[in-house]
Image (cartoon, rainbow, N blue to C red):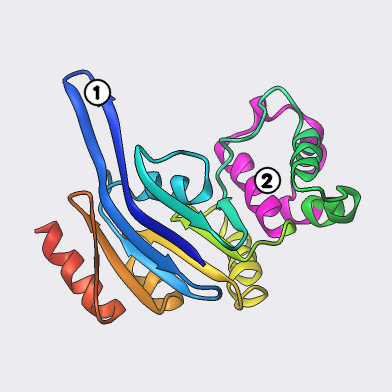
């Protein structure tokens, strides 16, 4: 289970402090599919980064009783001056995985060709996203975090991503943060709305989306 207890995130700004998340409580069981609606700037990406461990809360507690991915297609942890291949080896050492066992998958999935052995510094945002997504699929997690960035590359590559995540790993937990109703309606069984720094629960995904629509007005 993943559990967030009274989690708050405050950022210093030029004119004081901004509370992005305020007393968030969330429970995600193994295999559960959770969707979170929120408009741009509502704190969705901040929330997903904290669940992954890439960012710490200002206060509150996050318990991870199952393994959690980094946000899919998030390349913020890459060492820019290392090649994609060397970043792959570094991440495998971090997770105590033999890189040789996943190299072929990453090569085939990313379709980066010779650029896998070029510094990440020279990658386009799409190339970074392909590498990050491939590594997320190559290293197995109990829960995958999705920050509405799966629309990477052309439709063929997008379909490949959908198959890897939603078909081959349909037994895994998901936390999807998005303002795309189709993404959450198609893949989640429970939905919340993040607005004003608060996370509100609803009886159904449709009810959550209807409430989200009122927040946009």
Majority secondary structure of the magenta segment? helix
Tell me which residue sits at (43%, 77%) in the image: 186
Q: Does the magenta stretch include residue 124?
A: yes
Q: Tell me, yes or no, whether the highlighted magenta stretch contains residue 120.
A: yes
Q: Where is residue 33 in the image (x, y as percent from the top left)?
A: 46, 73
Which residue position is annotated with label 1?
13
Q: Is mark 2 on a helix, strand or loop?
A: helix
Q: How crowded is mark 1: few (under 14 residues within 10 Å), some or many (20 or more)?
A: few
Marked residue nearer the N-terminal end (1 or 2):
1
**Above or below for 110 versus 82:** below
Using the rendered image of the protein, determine whether residue 29 is visible from the camera's viewpoint. Answer: yes
* Front position among marks 1 and 2: 1
Contact check, label 1 and label 2, Cβ < 8 Å: no
Q: Which residue appears at 80% of the width and 41% of the height? A: 93
Range covered by the magenta-colored residues: 108-137
Q: Nearer the viewer, residue 172 or 1?
A: 1
Report the residue at 67% width, 28% height from top. Answer: 79
99 horizontally vs 94: left or right: right
Residue marked by disc 2 = 131
Q: Residue at x 59, y 34 (%)?
A: 124
Q: Residues within 10 Å of mark 2 (few under 14, many from 20)?
A: many
| Left or right relative to 181: residue 155 | right
């Amino acid at each position: 289970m993943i559990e967030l207890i009274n989690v708050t995130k405050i950022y210093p700004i030029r004119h004081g402090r901004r509370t992005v998340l305020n007393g968030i409580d969330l429970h995600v069981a193994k295999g559960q599919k959770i969707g979170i609606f929120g408009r741009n700037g509502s704190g969705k990406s901040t929330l997903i980064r904290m669940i992954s461990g890439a960012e710490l809360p200002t206060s509150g507690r996050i318990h991870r009783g199952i393994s959690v991915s980094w946000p899919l297609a998030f390349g913020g942890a890459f060492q820019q001056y290392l090649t994609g291949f060397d970043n792959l080896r570094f991440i495998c050492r971090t997770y105590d995985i033999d890189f040789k066992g996943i190299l072929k998958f990453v090569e085939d999935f990313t379709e980066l060709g010779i650029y896998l052995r070029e510094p990440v510094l020279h990658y386009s945002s799409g190339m970074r996203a392909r590498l990050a997504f491939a590594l997320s699929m190559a290293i197995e997690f109990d829960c995958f975090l999705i920050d509405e960035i799966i629309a990477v590359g052309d439709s063929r590559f997008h379909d490949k991503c959908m198959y890897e995540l939603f078909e081959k790993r349909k037994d895994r937990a998901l936390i999807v943060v998005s303002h795309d109703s189709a993404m959450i309606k198609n893949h989640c069984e429970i939905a919340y709305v993040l607005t004003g720094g608060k996370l509100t629960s609803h009886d159904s995904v449709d009810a959550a989306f209807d409430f989200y629509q009122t927040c946009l007005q």
